[in-house]
Image (tube, helix red, strand yellow):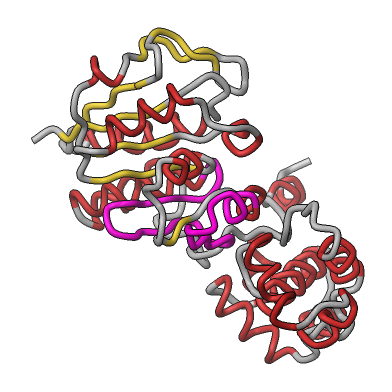
Amino acid sequence: MTHRVGFVVFDGVTLLDVSGPAEVLHQAGRLGHRYDLVLVSAHGGGVRTSTGMPLSGTVTAAEAGPVDTLLVAGGDRLAEQPVEAELLATARALAAPAERVASVCTGAFVLADLGLLDGRRAATHWRHAGTLARRHPRVRVEPDAIQVRDGRFITSAGISAGIDLSLALVEDDHGAEAARHIARELVVFLQRPGGQSQFTTATAPPTGNALLQPLIEAVLADPAAGHDLASMARAAAVSPRHLTRLFHTELGTTPARWVERVRLGRAQQLLLDGHSVTSAARHSGFGSDETLRRVFARHLGTTPGAYRQRFATTGSARTAAAAPG
């Protein structure tokens, strides 16, 4: 049985948001699991991706007809300016009858603008998570998640996370072995280590809030300093309750969780710069190796040492050193 998947695309769409999931589903077809892929845009015809390369042969929602799975691709402009009515109408028409509705990266802004994510958990690119939380306070944004499933809605993080999402769709439809085979073929992780995390050392986008911005800059400048709720509230000259509300509104999280993510980001960078686990724990504000290990396990699903080994280099340097001269 063929499963029909509609990709909503538009001028400025991120190419990998489309090509990554499409390749996963194409590989599923080589295993006998057929997916019928259709590119859908507001007006049909060609669209230009963020790279300048065109996608041709898109159709309108009416021409596409019902799809089993809707996948809304992302592009920076969805977070940087209001989503146009025609694009929203296209996504709305396809989402209504679809069994599953998914988004990659800032495609979540389209679903949120339609009200489909109200009261639900959602993910997007870490750089735009704060914007999504501010623009849509009824959406429970998880800023560090690779993908989030809530009912028939699946939202994923930025760009390459669309591959993770589509592997999960294949696993839903055809089992883990099919997804593992495709992951091996594409030379990617079926579930990347610390699969819940975007593995970014970035922790928050700038905020225009006059109370929060100096506080954010102070924490980022010295994560190892004392940054408990009471001291942060005093520094901002507000009550702890009001500061917590501001963090929820502006960044979609609590002050304590945000500080922990800042410290984790600093620890990640220190490890990649060659610091020991003990040094990274001390200079990032965690204090002890054991605390750092617990935080790594909770957020990244790995250990500090394993993280450093995996991400400190692409392996090209080791390959070059081992190659005959």
Give the quarter of the figure containing the C terminus. Answer: top right
- Residue 54 at what x, y percent from top left? 51, 12
Compared to 17, does 50 lie above or below?
Answer: above
Q: Which residues are magenta?
A: 131-160
Q: In the rendered picture of this protein, how many numbered marks are placed on residues?
A: 0
295 to the left or right of 161: right
Name the residue: 46% across, 41% down.
Answer: 113
**Magenta segment includes 135:** yes
66 to the left or right of 120: left
- Residue 194 at what x, y percent from top left? 52, 67
Name the residue: 28% across, 59% down.
Answer: 151
Name the residue: 63% across, 67% down.
Answer: 248
- Residue 250 at what x, y percent from top left? 68, 60
Quadrant location of residue 40? Answer: top left
Name the residue: 37% across, 27% down.
Answer: 89
Of 61 and 50, the residue lying toward us: 61
65 to the left or right of 162: left
Of 318 and 283, the residue lying toward us: 283
